[in-house]
Amino acid sequence: ANLIDIKEVRHTYQTQNGPLPVLDGLNVSVPEGGFCAVVGPSGCGKSTLTRLIAGLMKPDHGEVWLHGEPVKGPRSTVGMAFQNPVLLEWRTILQNVILPLEIVPNKLSRKEQEDRARHLLSLVGLTGFEDKRPSELSGGMRQRASLCRALVHKPEVLILDEPFGALDAFTREDLWQTMHRVKEKEPFTGVLITHDLRESIFLADQVIVLSGRPARTQYVLDVPDTG
Ligand code: ADP
Ligand code: ADP
């Protein structure tokens, strides 16, 4: 069974200049544990797709299903990380990572929450930085922390919206390796939005190419597992 099923989604934004059709025939299916990359030109509706999955928006037509149920509203069980990590400066890195556990209902004690956050920070190489403020970290380190925050409540879907787009090539490839390590130790079902075809092939097991105006799913490529 698929964890994410998006079938024949169409969407038009109503703007001051009239209707703006953005998506026309979006099809995305991701099995549990799958990692799907979505590539396409700027403005083709990739961020719109992330909002559909997170239940922040309803499509005009078509279906968005998660875990065999139609998405009806915002879902706290989706974890998100963006190009510019929004970390709270008045909190330490550890306190930033814990944040979703303070919001999403769970049975963990404060100690268990901290242990989980520390465990994730160690997976991404941030042991020793728990008590720093976000501004004391480099861009790549902030992105690592933001990844931990997106995973801390074990989301049913991890959405990464161009998470590595603002980083230099060296830091970016370092983070790709980190992603592989994280996926091994903390399995997730993921959707990665990216402009970078190399990145999508390195990280994902399925690549969906959107194009056209309005955009539709043009190609679905299965990336062979090269180990
Ligand atoms: P992408 O992430 O691929 O760049 P988006 O999903 O952000 O694309 O946007 C697709 C198109 O829809 C763009 O032309 C954008 O300007 C427009 N758009 C996005 N959000 C809104 C909105 N809330 N209202 C009106 N137009 C929007
Ligand atoms: P992206 O990084 O996905 O290309 P954009 O710069 O297109 O993002 O959009 C940033 C934010 O502005 C999004 O939340 C989008 O919904 C909103 N937005 C984009 N275009 C419009 C628009 N024409 N009218 C209203 N909101 C818009």
Image: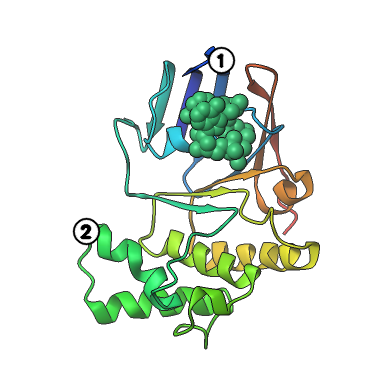
Residue at far bottom of view: 128
Q: Which residue is mark 1?
A: 21
Q: Nearer the viewer, residue 87 or 196?
A: 87
Q: Nearer the viewer, residue 218 or 98?
A: 98
Q: Position of residue 102 (x, y in %)?
A: 26, 65
Residue 76 as seen in the image, left or right of residue 36: left
The image quadrant where one finds ligand 2 is top right
Amino acid carrying mark 2 in the image: Pro
- Colouring used for the render: rainbow
Q: Position of residue 57 (x, y in %)?
A: 39, 30
10 Å crowding of disc 2: few (<14), some (14-19), many (20+): few
Of helix, strand and loop, which one carries label 2? Answer: loop
Q: Which residue is mark 2?
A: 105
10 Å crowding of disc 1: few (<14), some (14-19), many (20+): some
Residue 33 as seen in the image, left or right of residue 192: left
Q: Is residue 206 above or below residue 154?
A: above
Q: Position of residue 4 (x, y in %)?
A: 45, 36
- For the point 79% across and 67% down, the residue is 170
Amino acid carrying mark 1 in the image: Pro
Q: Nearer the viewer, residue 67 or 85?
A: 85
- For the point 69% across and 56% down, the residue is 166
Of helix, strand and loop, which one carries label 1? Answer: strand
Residue at far front of view: 16
Question: Tag 2 or tag 1, which sits nearer the N-term?
Answer: 1
Q: Which mark, by number, is residue 67?
A: none
Q: CA distance from mark 1 to mark 2?
A: 37 Å
Q: Visible in this render: residue 29?
A: no
- For the point 40% across and 74% down, the residue is 117
Q: Mark 1 and mark 2 in contact? Answer it, CB < 8 Å.
A: no
- For the point 45% across and 76% down, the residue is 93
Quadrant position of the N terminus in the picture: top left
Q: Quick check: is the Cβ at mark 2 less than 8 Å away from ligand 2?
A: no
